[in-house]
Image (spheres, rainbow, N blue to C red):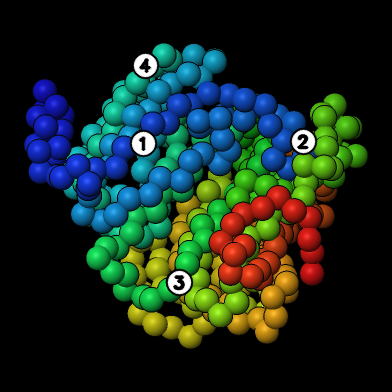
Amino acid sequence: MLRISILILLLGHFSVSKIRRYDLTIKYFMGNPDGVTKKILGVNGQFPGPTIRANKGGLLTIRVTNRIQTKEATTIHWHGFEQVLTPFQDGLEGVTQCGIPYGATMTYYFELKQAGTYWWHSHHSTQYTDGCWGSLIVGNTPREVYDYDEELVITVNDWHHQPASELLEWYLSPASKGNEPIPDSVMINGRGTYPCDYARLNGRTCSTAAQKPLVLEVQRGKRYRIRLINTSSMANFNFSIDNHMLETIEVDGVDTVRVPPVDVVRIFSAQRYSFLVKMDSTSIGSSFWIRASAFTSSYNTTPNINRFPEAFLENTEVRAILLYTNPKGGGKNQNVNRVS
């Protein structure tokens, strides 16, 4: 009854224009984001899941439906939100709510008192390791603290071909000796590469045609806000864009004071950054590597559930392409294979 009363009060407090509504349906589908086919726990048939966008001062309502074929429960956590007066919307199963049963629907609702870069993910067991996550961006209206022309959202993550439930069972067993499961690959915006020869040794289908790098188009002379989110289970990264400097303006939803730009930034699991990047290449058609290089110092290969850890340890950098275009083609993500 308390939740219903608060929802009625919140809905009455906000105009229709300030209420943003989303529907998320969670279920497995087959995909090959690094070329290797596996069962992904996607949302609305997507991996990564949909990006949720809203503005500070509004009300966000998200209806989550559990269609997971294994009939396990689920919840969604809104990572980074303080949930003042709405702790029961935090999505922590067994702490702030019971799991959403198979076939059921729950509507989350909370006031957006914080602007910045966030993300959402399942908070039931290891589900987000299997793909149940997405970005959550809250604009700071009526104006942003920093001026920029456009923005891009970039996620980095580690990826495992084995079901996450098997990884957890092994990790918690004496057989692991406390060693973390070594990922098979790393990704930018849900896309990576894995050596198909190793995939075949594991009896898995692998397609090199699915391994084309992501292309992010930008326009010369514009200033972009790059929102970077690490959605990994464990991995941390060095992130950089060739021949471009990164001026940090936000860390984990908090605007920063101005600091000198840098050429590389380290980002740990669940962290978020925003950078200002001036697209100041001298010619249209120029392209530059966007790089995310995973650190490997915490991984031990003996023992490990990953049969071929060398497939990852010899290929720890994932790349996308920053492509300068004419004004008619700027600001789009395309699946083309163009390199600098």
Distance CA(mark 4)–CA(mark 2): 31 Å
Locate the N terminus and report the quarter of the image it occupies: top left
Pick the front one: 54 or 167: 54
- Please give the name of the residue rendered at 46% of the width and 59% of the height, measured from the top-left corner: 272
Residue 216 appears in the figure: yes
The amino acid marked with disc number 1 is Tyr
Distance CA(mark 1)–CA(mark 2): 30 Å
The amino acid marked with disc number 2 is Val
Residue 119 % position (x, y): 43, 48
The residue where tag 4 is placed is 104
The amino acid marked with disc number 3 is Asp
Q: Classify residue 338 as left or right of residue 181.
A: right
The residue where tag 2 is placed is 36
- Please give the name of the residue rendered at 14% of the width and 37% of the height, measured from the top-left corner: 11
Q: Classify residue 80 as left or right of residue 167.
A: left
Residue 138 % position (x, y): 34, 55
Q: Classify residue 252 as left or right of residue 188.
A: left
Dividing the picture into quadrants, the one containing residue 117 is bottom left
Distance CA(mark 1)–CA(mark 4): 16 Å
Q: Which mark is residue 149?
A: 3
Q: Secondary structure at mark 2?
A: loop
- Mark 1 or mark 2: which is in front? 1
Q: Classify residue 79 as left or right of residue 229.
A: left
- Relative to 66, does residue 294 appear above or below in the rendering? below
- Mark 3 or mark 4: which is in front? 3
The residue where tag 1 is placed is 22
Distance CA(mark 3)–CA(mark 2): 37 Å
- Please give the name of the residue rendered at 22% of the width and 46% of the height, measured from the top-left corner: 17
Whether residues under marks 3 and 4 lie with C-beta atoms below 8 angstroms apart, the answer is no
- Please give the name of the residue rendered at 77% of the width and 50% of the height, measured from the top-left corner: 212
**Label 2: few (<14), some (14–19) or many (≥20) C-alpha neighbours in 10 Å:** many
